[in-house]
Amino acid sequence: MNVKTRNRTRHYRTVSFDARTNAVVLIEQRLLPHRFQLVRTPDYRATARAITEMIVRGAGAIGATAAYGLAQGARAFHGAGLAAFERHMEKAFQTLKEARPTAVDPVNAMVEVRRKMAAGQTVAERQTLALAAAEHFADEVVAHCEAIGRHGVKLIRDGARVLTHCNAGWLAFVDVGTATAPMYAAQAAGRKFHVFCDETRPRCQGASLTAWELAQQGISHEVIADNAAGFLMSRGEVDLVIVGSDRTLGRTGEVANKIGTYTKAVLAQRHDIPFYVAIPLSTIDWNMKSGRDIPIEERHADETLGAWGVTRRGRREYVRVANPTSGARNPGFDVTPPELIAGILTPAGIFKPRELWRHRARLGGPA
Ligand code: MRU
């Protein structure tokens, strides 16, 4: 999307690759919205660290980053022996996979890169194929987001008030975003609407990232405390909820997404407000049989016990909020059951969550 920095507007992708230096180029999301900065990771281990440390975050964005990281690892290999090359690739795959556990997109992206690489007869051919496959994955995520916008635009009527949680915008993908795609399409169609961005404690991706994206795009919005959503719903001030997902089970329709999503889905059902989940095809896990098996990332207690912000002088700082002797639990994600979800918004159309499996052929699933 376009980013305005110092009176200049330029188009950026969240993740890209510099083939000349074999570096992955990322927007440093921990500094947003206060500072816009690009960082370059020189090798696959640094790329994995950037995912773990959340320089880059969001399911689709870490999917593309992992795909590029794998290609980066392939291109850094010196030698001609295929067996040694494949051992090296397995190490890179595992390192990138372990960087964060909940989102399935990195695994799906890297499996696809590996599948395409296998057609190469030599190390050099596989290296070339790896980068082409990573570029294809990144382009496909963007195309999926655009298609989600075309299918989802009908959900946002003139005057609608939309609630979203966390950041499922372009920063969480490569461009456009999923939950935001119907918003951009509605804006392009000339509709007026308003977005409530859940703050999304503890890391505040809604207050910092989604609000920044919408502001950049000139979309009317307000940040609300996570606890305010129920009140607004009870007063008839929310017409629709659209969120993203980090892993959606193709067999059951269960949806893992940022912690707090389940609470919003329960509230939406109570107030008869349609609750939609927008995903590219790389977010579907066709193998897992139960939402209970989804690996839920437990993050550091400090995130819950305090907050990061930027001082008046522009320095990023952490402040402790909670009682100094208390500990905390900090699950990063929760799982929403299919009965609370009005529809899964995909590049192939809108489906009931329990119908994903039946439509798997259209959704890139197994035969
Ligand atoms: O912990 P994050 O910021 O990487 O969280 C992942 C997400 O971006 C959200 O859960 C989002 O709603 C899913 S859409 C990519």
Image: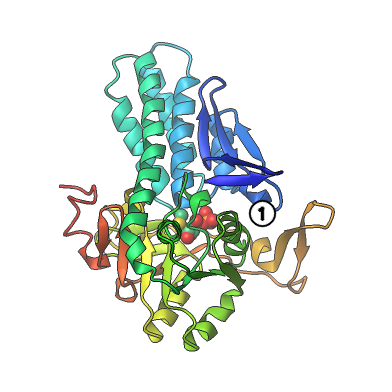
Q: Position of residue 164 (x, y in %)?
A: 48, 67
Please name whichever residue, 150 or 49, is drawn nearer the observer in this view of the structure.
150
Please name whichever residue, 165 or 71, is drawn nearer the observer in this view of the structure.
165
Kind of residue indicated by mark 1: Pro
Above/below status of 183 relative to 92:
below
Is residue 230 rendered to the left or right of residue 34? left
Please name whichever residue, 309 or 89, is drawn nearer the observer in this view of the structure.
309
Count residues near mark 1 (Cα–Cα under 10 Å), then give few for <14, some for 14-19, many for 20+: some
Is residue 153 rendered to the left or right of residue 36? left
Query: Can residue 264 be seen here?
Result: yes
Furthest toward the front, the residue is: 190
The residue positioned 84% from the left and 53% from the top of the image is: 313
Above/below status of 112 relative to 284:
above
Query: Can residue 49 be seen here?
Result: no
Residue under label 1, please give it.
Answer: 33
Quarter of image, res 116: top left
The residue positioned 64% from the left and 69% from the top of the image is: 328
Q: Is mark 1 within 8 Å of ligand 1?
A: no
Q: Position of residue 177 (x, y in %)?
A: 45, 52
Furthest toward the bottom, the residue is: 235
